[in-house]
Amino acid sequence: MAAKKPFFPLLDVKMIAHRQDGLHLSKTKAEASFSSFAQALDAARSMIESLTERDFVETKQQRDPCDVYVVAIDKRGWYVKLTLLPEQVILISFHPLERPLRTARGHEVKT
Amino acid sequence: MSAKTKTASKKGFRCVECDSGIVRPVAAPGRQARHRTLTLPVPADLEIPTCGNCGTEWIGDSVARKLDAALEKEFRVRMRDLVTVSLARLSKHSISKAHVERVLGLSQGYLSHLTTTGDKTPSEALALNLVHFAQNPQRLRSSEALWRKISGPKPDPTGALGL
């Protein structure tokens, strides 16, 4: 059976996130894991740039669809949830994993 | 652009945190933000895209640049004040800046430069050390004793820690 695919094409996500002001994340979440907002955005951009469909976990249907990914950064698992607007990527979650998580392809990423 | 993407008003976008409010630039007094190790006031005139319903603030590049610059400026003032007050207290115990510089392995004149010009931000580690020395100058003498203990041909770091 074919693995589930992200709702938002990764090429679109990467292209828009790469633009000036094309990526937004919540202030509270940026503060929690980074010492400056520029550092948070830099880290988020690098993370998005490195995303592949292998990192995709699921699409959550809130009021709008949100794609969930799990990525390993410096040997630590990070939880990523994003949605796409016409001119910006909204990074809803970007924080270290609280528990191990399995990708749609069955690969488990540890905390 | 993918057909799957949502439409958003040019004046703002719907908040994905609460799924109901509209996010628009807001400038207001009384806001705070974390910067490095401190929580600092955000300038009242700095606009941050904010949800009108849940209050979630959303940060993009332009806002991040302005916010980081404002917070770093305030952070520098607070660290410099801490350093200046600590050095003044040490001076009352006849401990000079040059003496502190030697103990902390700083370049000669570094502390004077730090407190008289505004171009450098003292690190939290330096400010903390100076505060600890000012609170109890004996700590500075203990630090000197520590350097002596781990000098020489057979240093004993465990013994130097008093373990």
Image (cartoon, coloured by chain):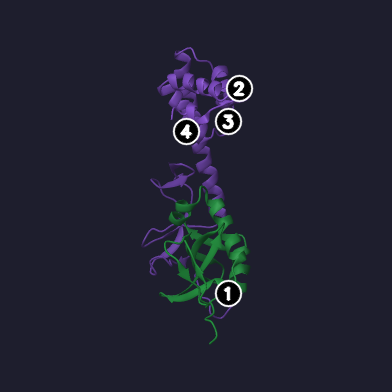
Chain colours: A green, B purple
Whether discs 2 and 1 lie on one chain: the answer is no
Q: Label 3 is found on which chain of the structure? A: B
- Is residue B2 among what the camera can see? yes
Q: Are marks 4 and 1 in contact (CB under 8 Å)?
A: no
Q: Label 4 is found on which chain of the structure? A: B
Q: Establish if B1 lies above or below B161.
A: below
From the viewer's side, name the closer residue of B156 and B91.
B156
Distance (Cα) linking label 3 and label 2? 39 Å
Q: Nearer the viewer, mark 1 or mark 3?
A: 1
Amino acid type shown at disc 2: Gly
Whether discs 4 and 3 lie on one chain: the answer is yes
Q: Secondary structure at mark 2?
A: loop
Q: Are marks 3 and 2 in contact (CB under 8 Å)?
A: no
Indicate the position of residue B53 as horizontal and vertical percent values.
36, 63
Residue where numbered disc 1 is placed: A53
Q: Nearer the viewer, mark 3 or mark 2?
A: 2
Q: Are marks 2 and 1 in contact (CB under 8 Å)?
A: no
Residue B152 is tagged as 2
Amino acid type shown at disc 4: Arg
Indicate the position of residue B77 as horizontal and vertical percent values.
50, 33
Q: Secondary structure at mark 4?
A: helix
Q: Nearer the viewer, mark 2 or mark 4?
A: 2
Q: Label 2 is found on which chain of the structure? A: B
Residue B70 is tagged as none
Indicate the position of residue B55 as horizontal and vertical percent values.
38, 58
Q: Are marks 1 and 3 in contact (CB under 8 Å)?
A: no
Amino acid type shown at disc 1: Glu
Residue B118 is tagged as 3
Residue where numbered disc 4 is placed: B78
